[in-house]
């Protein structure tokens, strides 16, 4: 898994912005949309798996996948003009793990 820095975004937040767009409260402005804080993708995946009770070993590597080392750093983080939505990864993860199906 490439060790990318990404701003995860909750689907509910995307839905809220789409609803605003449908009612034209955005006044036709197109903007980048992102989660409120950048996260290390590998760390985020590890926390997600742990919250679901899974024990899969993730190895950070640039040798597999579609994205290479040119995606390192803040390449996938939006600029200062982006609209940031409120839900951070940890509260989302806490809510999801409470409803995640168990493997037993």
Image (cartoon, helix red, strand yellow):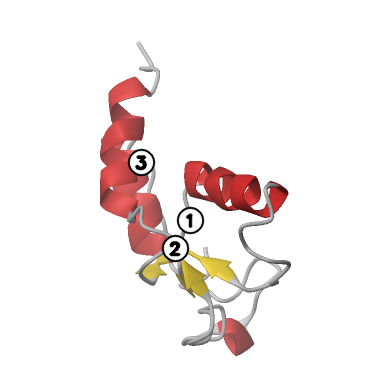
Task: Tell me whether circle 2 and circle 1 mark residues in contact (CB < 8 Å).
Answer: yes
Instruction: Please say whether residue 56 is visible from this viewpoint.
Output: yes
Q: 62 above or below 98? A: below
- Whether 6 is drawn above or below 52: the answer is below
Q: Secondary structure at mark 3?
A: helix
Q: CA distance from mark 3 to mark 1?
A: 18 Å
Question: What percent of the width, then of the height, locates residue 60?
Answer: 44, 68
Q: Quadrant of residue 58?
A: bottom left
- Real-space Cα separation, disc 3 to disc 2, in angstroms: 20 Å
Label 2's element?
Answer: loop
Q: Which mark, by number, is residue 98?
A: none
Residue at x 48% of width, y 56% of height:
9
Q: Nearer the viewer, mark 3 or mark 1?
A: 1
- Mark 1 residue element: loop
Numbered tag placed on residue 35 in the rendering: 2
Label 2 to label 1: alpha-carbon separation: 4 Å
Task: Say which residue label 1 marks.
Answer: 9
Q: Which residue is mark 3?
A: 49
Who is closer to the viewer here, 75 or 67?
A: 75
Could you say where residue 12 lies in the image, as x and y percent from the top left?
A: 49, 41
On screen, residue 59 above or below 63? above
Q: Looking at the image, which residue is at 56% across and 78% down?
A: 76
Outermost residue to the top: 104
Q: Give the x, y percent position of residue 74.
A: 48, 86
Q: Earlier in the sequence, mark 3 or mark 1?
A: 1
Q: Nearer the viewer, residue 23 or 60?
A: 23
Is residue 90 shown left or right of residue 7?
Answer: left
100 or 43, which is in the foreground?
Answer: 100
Residue at the spot 69% in from the left edge and 55% down from the top edge: 24
Seen at 38% across and 66% down, the residue is 36
């Amino acid at each position: 898994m490439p060790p990318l820095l990404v701003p995860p975004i909750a689907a509910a937040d995307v839905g809220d912005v789409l609803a605003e767009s449908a009612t034209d409260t955005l006044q036709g402005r197109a903007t980048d949309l992102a989660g409120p804080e950048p996260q290390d993708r590998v760390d985020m995946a590890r926390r997600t798996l742990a919250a679901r009770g899974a024990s899969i070993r993730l190895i950070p590597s640039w040798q597999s996948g579609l994205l290479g080392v040119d995606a390192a750093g803040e390449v996938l983080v939006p600029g200062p003009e982006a609209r940031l939505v409120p839900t951070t990864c940890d509260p989302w993860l806490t809510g999801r793990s409470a409803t995640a199906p168990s493997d037993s």
